[in-house]
Amino acid sequence: MKLKVTSLALGALMAAAPAMADLVMPSLSYRTGPYAAGGIPFADGYADYFTLLNERDGGIGGVPVRLLECETGYNTEKGVECYESTKGEGALVYQPLSTGITYQLIPKTTADDIPLHTLGYGRTSAKNGDVFSHTFNYPANYWDGASGAINYLLEVNDNDLSGKKIALVYHNSAYGKEPIRTLETLAEKHGFELSLLPVDHPGQEQKSQWLQIRRDRPDNVIMWGWGVMNQVAIQEAANIRFPMEDFIGIWWSGGDHDVLPAGEAADGYKALTFHAVGDDFPVFDDIQTHVVDKGLAAGAGDQVGNVLYNRGLYAAMLAAEAVKEAQEIHGVADITPSMMRDGMEALEMTEERMAALGLPNFGPAFTASCENHGGDGYVGVTQWDAKNQTWSLVSDFAPTDGDVIGALVDEDSGAYAAENNIPSNCN
Amino acid sequence: MPDQLLFAMEVTLNGLMAGVLYALVALGFVLIFKASGIFNYAQGVMALFAAMTLVGIMKGQVPFSHLINAIFGTDIHYFGWHVPSLIAILLTCVVMVGLAWCVQYFIMRHLVNQEPIILFMATIGLAYFLEGFSDLMWGSEIKKLDVGLPQGINETIDRVTFDWFGYGFFIDNLDIVATVIAALLVVALVVFSQYTREGRAMRAVADDHQAALSVGVSLNFIWVMVWSVAGFVALVAGIMWGTKSGVQFSLSLIALKALPVLMLGGFTSIPGAIVGGLIIGVGEKLFEFALGPALGGATENWFAYVLALVFLVFRPQGLFGEKIIERV
C-alpha cells in the first residue's frame, strides 16, 4: 500500500512538472558513400554552430538546441525515411542538402506544417512563398547562380558577351539541368553562344566532354557538378590546358575537396558563392573555445573553416536567427514548427545583425517575406589559390538578373500551383 | 584532311585509352569468375579499399584513428612519416593478400558447393562491409594520390600530329601509362596461368574443382591466390582511377564501367576483357562524338550497355567466353 501511494505521488509530481523543452533541429546528413566528402563538412558546420549556441548561450532564448542527425547517404529514399522517423520529435526545420530529397519533402512538409530550408539548392521556384508556403531557399537559388555567373563574366568582359562562346558542363540530372533555361534566356539577352555538355552520373569519365571543349574552344566554361564529377572536371580542364581563370563552378562545385586532388593545376579555378570563405571571423574564435577545445566538435573536428563547413554553419545561423524571430513574434521560447515558419518568413538579415553574431559580411543582407522565400539572390565569386590552399572572394555579393529570374520563378511556380490546386499563401 | 575526320581519329585514340582503363577493372572480375565461378560484386570496392590503403600507408595515416580517438579521447591521426610509393605499393599488396585470406577463411570456404546466386549474394555483402570498413579505417575525405605517374597532354603526340595534320591530338600521359601497365599485366597473367605450377592449378580448379581436388590441388590455397591476384589488379585499377579523380568513395562505382566490358568480352577470358574494353571504349566515344549532340549528349553510359547487348544477341557467352554446354 505504501509503495502504491509513493508511486502515485511520484506520477502526479512528474505530470505536474513542466516538460524539458528543447529546440529540435534535424540534420539529414551524409557522412558515408560517394558524396560524403561534401556531406561531412556541411554537417559538421551545421552541428558545431548549434553546439556553440548551447555551450556559450545556453541555447536560443534559453532553450537548448537538440540536433537530430540522420544518415541519408545522399539517397532520396533514405532521406524520406529520415524525415518520417524524426518529424514526430518536434522537428523545427529540415535541411536535407539534396535536391532529390527536397522534391520529395516539399509536399510532405507542407502537409505536416514543418518548414523546409534548402539553402542554395532544391526547387528554385520555391522562392515564391505564395505557392510554396513551407519551403525556403534563401539567400540564393540555382537561377541566381546562373545569372551570377553571367553577371561576373559581363563584369570581366566590359559588359559585353556578344559573340562569346560559353559551355555549360553539367551533371546529367534534375540538379544539373536547373540552370539551362536561365542560361538560354540570358544567352538570348546578352548574345552569347551557349553549348550544353551533360556528364552522366557519377562523372568519373569525362573525356568526351573535354575533348569537345578542346575542339570548340569556348571562352568560358560554367560547371554544375557534384561529387566526383567536380574533381575529374577540374583535372580534365587542367589536362587540356583550359585556363582556370575562365572556368567557373556553381557553389556546389567550389569546395576544398573539389580542387585539392588536382594540386597546383587547379590554381585560379573560380566558384560562385553566397557566403564568405575562410575562418577570419570572430565566431570561429568562439567555436574554437566553446566547441573544439572542449572536444565537442562534430565529426573529426578537422573541417572548421573550409567552404562547406562555412555553408553548414551559415545554414545553422540562419535557422537560429529564424528561431529568435519566431520567439519574438509569438512571445514564447519553446516554439513549434508552425511558429518557426513564421520566424523564417519574418527573417531580416542585416549587416549589423551578422556583425553582432561574429559573422560580419559573412553573407549578403536580405529580407524574407511571405511572398519572397528566396531572399534577394546576391551572388559572389571566389577563386582558388593552390599554393596557399585558400579560397578568396574576388567579386563581392552582387545582385542577379531579377527580371529574368522573377519571370521564370513566376512561370514555374504558377504551373506547380495550377497542377496541384494550391491556393495563395499570402492573401 | 577534313576536320571531322581528324577529330574522329582523336576520339578513337582516346576511346582506346579509356577502354584500357575499363579493362583494368574488368580483369579483376574475370580472374575470380574464371577460377571459382563467382561474380565478385565487390571488385569495385576492392579497388577503392586498395587505393585508400595505399594513400593511407604513403601518408603515414593511423588506421581507425577516428575510432581510436573516439574511444580513448586521443587526438592521433598520423604517424608522422611518409612512405615512398614503391614500398607503399608493396605493403598494400600484402594487405590485399591479407584481405584475400580473410575473404576465403571467413566467407568462401563456408560456401563451397553453394549455388552461384548464394556466392554472388555473399559478395554483395562483402562489398557493403568493405565499403564501411574502408571508411572506418581510412576516413571518408577525398585523398590526393600521387605515385609519380605523369598526367596531362602528351607533348610529343601533340607536336607530331600537329606537324602531320595541322591539328595536335590530345592524349593523356596517364592513359598511355595505363595502357603500358595493362599490357604488362595481361602478359604477366597469361604467363602465370600458362607456365607456372600455381597457374596451372588455378586453371584446373576453374575447369573442374572436384577433379582438381582429387589430384591434390588445395582449393583454399588457389582461392586465396586468385583473390590476391584480383586484389592486385584492383590496386592497379585503383591507382589509375584514383590518380585521375582523387581517392574517394566513387571509385567503387567504376565497377559499372566493367559490366558491359564483361558482357562483351566474356566472363572467363583475360584477352576478352582487354578486347571488350577497347571495343566499349572506342564504341561509346565515337557514338558520343557522332550522335551525342543530336541526342542531347551523355550517351556513353547507356550506349556501352546497348553495344554489349547487341553482341550478346549473337554470342551469349561473349566474344571470348567459353560456350556453356549442359547435357541432359
Image (cartoon, coloured by chain):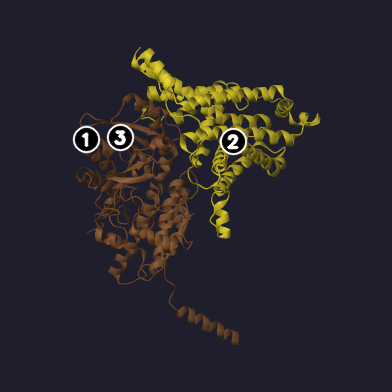
| Amino acid on which the number 3 mark rests in the picture | Asp
Q: Nearer the viewer, residue A105 or B80?
A: B80
- Report the number of discs: 3
x, y percent for residue A337: 36, 63
Q: Nearer the viewer, mark 1 or mark 2?
A: 2
Mark toward the start of the polypeptide (1 vs 3): 1
As drawn, the chain in brown is: A
On screen, residue A211 above or below A388: above
- Dot 3 falls on a residue whose secondary structure is helix
Q: Is residue A103 left or right of residue A30?
A: left
Three-letter code, disc 2: Ile
Question: Where A145 sits versus B192, above or below?
Answer: below
For mark 3, name the chain: A
Q: Is B318 displayed left or right of B282 in the figure?
A: right
Residue pointed to by mark 2: B89
Q: Is residue B41 visible?
A: no
Q: Are marks 1 and 2 on the same chain?
A: no
Do the numbered discs 2 and 3 sit on residues whose CB atoms are within 8 Å?
A: no
The residue pinned by badge 1 equals: A157
The three-letter amino acid code for the residue at tag 1 is Asn
